[in-house]
Image (cartoon, helix red, strand yellow):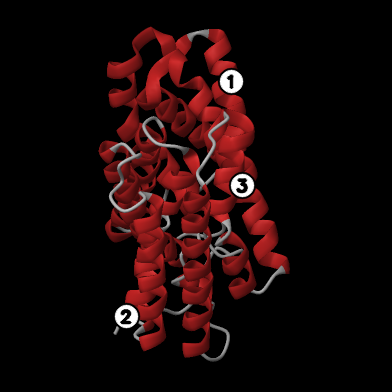
Amino acid sequence: FGSAVAALLFPRAGALGIVTLRLVLSAGLLLVVCRPRVRGYARADWAVVCGFGIALGGMNTLFYQAIERIPLGPAVTLEVLGPLALSVFTSRRLASLLWAALALAGVFLLGEGGFGQLNLGGVAFALGAGAMWAAYILMSARAGARFPKADGLALAMSVAALVSLPIGVASAGSALVVPSTLALGLALAAMSSGLPYSLELFALRRLPAPTFAVLMSLAPAIAAIAGLLVLGQELAATQWLAIALVVTASIGAVRTGQARRTGPVAAAEVGPVERTEPADGRAPARDEG
């Protein structure tokens, strides 16, 4: 729903301007709330944070470019293919290939056999955002292993804001400092970053990680509903079916990854939906084989 609101703000400052506003204000909120320590870290730690921030900024920038061109539901459905591919590659089970095939069938239906009704540029941006989402998952785990609590996320968001700022200023200019736009941007930062990340941390303290991952696999369907209710973006029946296939494939991939593992290792570490660090700030052990 935060992304749907962001799309409403595009006429004020453009997609690049709005994503910059969101990242900068989100970074400010996280720095105030988390107050991360910046001393005592090695050069390798800062390299991880910079990679994490670039992945975070790239994911958001590419996704906003996508929803400027294609409806929100299809955009999230295409974006989730990146984490889904990561889950399939790390699972190494035959069943994962079947889930991947189901997801590809959904993508085929989404474009009704050739993306004739979707802007190809928007499709490319959504797929790029998915690739950055997969990178985000990997870098989030590494940052969580090196930084306490949500400090890694706060510092990475700051890196993302610094990288995005020159692009946003060049694109939107003085439109970024219009008081009404700043106020709406602050609300957007809370809706799209502050509130979701906080709720994810609370959920991870109360739910098993695999259950959390399965619930988060519903993101494409929820995005389609948000697009319909907020933006009036109606989808054809075949596109709703496509979203259902990708959601099913995402859930199946999470369950398959869970079945491969034993003990306390969270299946969500390679699941298609984890967007934040574990609740205790440390990444679970990873199989790097």
* 210 sits left or right of 249 in the view: right
Image quadrant for the C terminus? bottom left
SS class, disc 3: helix
Q: Nearer the viewer, residue 120 or 151?
A: 120
- Which tag, 2 or 1, sits closer to the chain's start? 1
Q: In this view, does 99 lie above or below 239?
A: below
Quadrant of res 192: top right
Question: Mark 2 highlights which residue?
Answer: 288
- Residue at image mark 3: 196
Residue 118 to residue 265: above or below = above
**Residue 19 location (% of width, % of height):** 42, 30
Mark 3 Cα-neighbour bin, 10 Å: few <14, some 14–19, many ≥20:
some
- The residue pinned by badge 1 equals 184
Q: Which amino acid does label 2 sit on?
A: Glu
Q: Which of marks 2 and 3 is nearer the N terminus?
A: 3
Residue at x 30%, y 34% (from the top left corner): 163
- Secondary structure of residue under mark 1: helix
Disc 2 from disc 1: Cα separation: 42 Å
> Which residue occupies the foreground of this view, 120 or 2?
120
Q: Can you name the residue that lies furthest to the right here?
A: 206
| Disc on the earlier residue, 3 or 1 | 1
Front residue of this view, candidates 58 and 249: 249
Which residue is painted at 35% across and 26% down in the image?
16
Q: Are marks 2 and 3 in contact (CB under 8 Å)?
A: no
Image quadrant containing the N terminus: top right
Q: Is residue 126 visible?
A: yes
Q: Which quadrant of the view contains residue 41?
A: bottom left
Q: Nearer the viewer, mark 2 or mark 3?
A: 3
Give amino acid for label 3. Pro
